[in-house]
Amino acid sequence: MRRIAAFLAVAVVLLGLAAHGRDRLDDWVAQTVLPPILSEVAVEVRARDGALLRAFAVEGGRMRLAMQPDQADPQFIAMLIAYEDKRFHNHGGVDLRAMLRAAAQAAWHGEIVSGGSTLTMQVARLLENSGTGSFKGKLRQMRVALALERRLSKVEILSLYLHHAPYGGAVEGLRAASLAWFGKEPQRLTQAEAALLIALPQAPEVRRPDRHPQTARAARDRVLSRLDLIADARQPDVPKSMRTIPQDAPHLAASLRHSAPAALRLDTTIDRQLQRRMQELAQRAVAGQASGVSAAIIVADHGTGEILAHVGSPAFSSTHGALGFVDMTVAKRSPGSTLKPLVYGLAFDQGLVHPNTLINDAPVSFGGYAPQNFDGRFRGVLTVRDALVLSLNIPPVLLTHELGAARLMSGLRRAGADPQLPSGQAGLAIALGGVGISLHDLVQLYAGIAQGGKARQLSARRQKKSPLPKQFISPVAAWQVSNILSGIAPPNGAGAVAGQIAYKTGTSYGHRDAWAIGFDGQHVVGVWLGRPDGTPVPGAFGGALAAPVVFEAFGRIGPDRAPLPAPPPETLIQSTAHLPEPLQRFRSRAAVFAADPDRPVVTFPPDGAVLQRSGFGVPLKVQAGKLPMTVLVDGMPMITHLRGRDVLLPLKTAGFTRISVVDARGQSSSVEIRLD
């Protein structure tokens, strides 16, 4: 009864104001202090096709999405005005006829039969969050409504309603409601969907279809009935649950929002459907794994540098504990063996080796650092190609020793990576993963290799200008590395794509990280699995855990593979035996200039010796060297085809004499003596 009395009183006041003259009413309206009319809306992150990826709630946790009336289904707008405010386009904020009719009906029936509030009055109530049951509240709504009509256009007032109308829970505004209740943007609503969204704001909690389906259905049908529309029996029933507003690529979205805090819309290169397939793949990858294991996936087009999918963890929720909110695409971790391709690429460029160069996988020590292969075995002499395919540890350490650890760090930075050294100083161990690097940077490195050695900066922002690419290894070295990686056997079940994908796996020390990075002629995919807190995952190997995920990711990209590029024209493609002699077998620079242990050495007389002449001559003793040998005295042959290592030289003339020995391979040794 109090609401009826208030309703009638407002109608009387309205008539009184009108009766006292237009000027007095105008003054009353002009002095109105309006509530804030600038609607705070969610920051939106959009996919490459404009679809919503993620929206960030406004103050109070409310989900309110920006929209204009022309973004709504025209049928919805027509139904809304016809049902709520037939004379919306003609009145000045308060519909006197509707108010009087509603007052008369209330007096006759003893209850409110129809509302007299216009859409503008409802906007006034929503902006101030005021009630409707008191005389004071209703009068305030009328005053604000009249003031709004004088300061805003009808389109702007309608836009305010479409932003602030409540639809249950924290959902406000038509666009958020359409996504929450029907999972789609409001451009194409059915009549039944539109009718429900018209009925809900009048009692959003009482009519919530997920909690009160019968009440919601009845309210929807009343709207259809009043508008002379019949609910199609084939239409689906009211929604049984409220959908979650899209939260795709949540880690990336949060990062982009942080980098551009003033932007209300952030357009990305993310492919929404591919993103969802990768999110599902990440969840499958950790299913059945040990507790706390997370996963991260990046898919990019290495030709454009566009990131197409970005998964920071399997679930952006507490499902996997607080660690599910940690973006593991940017975490610095040990890359294991995934840096070996860069080591070999730099070595190819420096002319140290060729893919078919022989290299010795044998025990070695550098100042106490003695690298071991993963299985503790040594393979002996094999080609560089096989050393990379088998992911042996000693050959890349040998090459890094020749290159210098600083050159490897420089190569990483020129490829666009930001490596971090645990000790602050580069050592040989970086070749085997002794450096911190992120999945994003590793994918960027492999994208550069796929692009012929040109650094490719990956980005998820649309229309972001990339710097001119820098060459960090030559096109020939990049092709040689790619060709070797494409020869690595794919994991079980992926045989159909053998040779079409170049990839490398890695496992960090203590089984803390499992990696796999692969690329074809267009896409590059990176996968990481492990525990975000860095604790070991016993039995975790990149080849067993991460590699199958990479190949499944390529399958989810699509069935067709862009071919890997052909070799550059200047590429030297030769077998080991036909390579230039310095490339046939790897020897360190120190070994090249060091004395050959097989070279002949004159052990007597020693160099610089002073001997007394005798009637027997001078004894000569030679160690090592291949027989037969030639002995020269002062450049003239004295003995040829010497088949022993001891001989007596008939030297009797006083003075300085040079004795030289040349073995069967042309290696020589000389001493100079003086006879007294």
Image (cartoon, grey):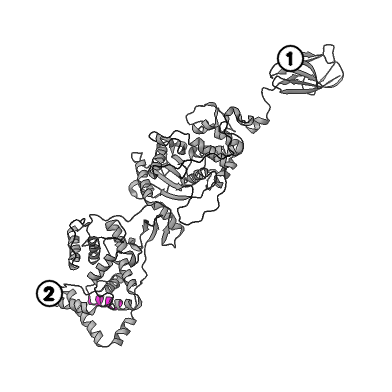
Q: Is residue 485 magenta?
A: no
Q: In the drawing, does residue 274 fall left or right of residue 10?
A: right
Residue sitting nearer the eye, 538 or 40: 40
Q: Position of residue 469 (x, y in %)?
A: 55, 50
Can residue 426 be seen at all in this image of the molecule?
A: no
Q: Position of residue 147 (x, y in %)?
A: 32, 78
Residue at 45% of width from left, 45% of height from top?
523
Which range of residues does the magenta coloring cover? Answer: 132-144
> What mark, if any, has residue 109 been given in the picture?
2
Q: Amino acid at mark 2?
A: His
For marks 1 and 2, give the one nearer the viewer. 1
Q: Residue furthest front?
A: 569
Quadrant including the C terminus: top right
Q: Amino acid at mark 1?
A: Leu
What is the C-alpha distance between the residues marked 1 and 2?
135 Å
Q: Determine which quarter of the picture holds residue 621.
A: top right
Residue sitting nearer the eye, 216 or 555: 555
Q: Residue furthest top?
A: 616
Q: Position of residue 253 (x, y in %)?
A: 41, 55
Q: Residues within 10 Å of mark 1 (few under 14, many from 20)?
A: some
**Label 1 or label 2, whichever comes before in sequence order:** 2
Q: Residues within 10 Å of mark 2 (few under 14, many from 20)?
A: few
Q: Secondary structure at mark 2?
A: helix
> What mark, if any, has residue 642 been given in the picture?
1
Q: Position of residue 644 (x, y in %)?
A: 72, 13
Residue sitting nearer the eye, 323 or 206: 206
Q: Residue furthest left?
A: 109
Quadrant including the N terminus: bottom left
Secondary structure mostly seen in magenta is: helix
Residue sitting nearer the eye, 668 or 170: 668
Can residue 525 be seen at all in this image of the molecule?
A: yes
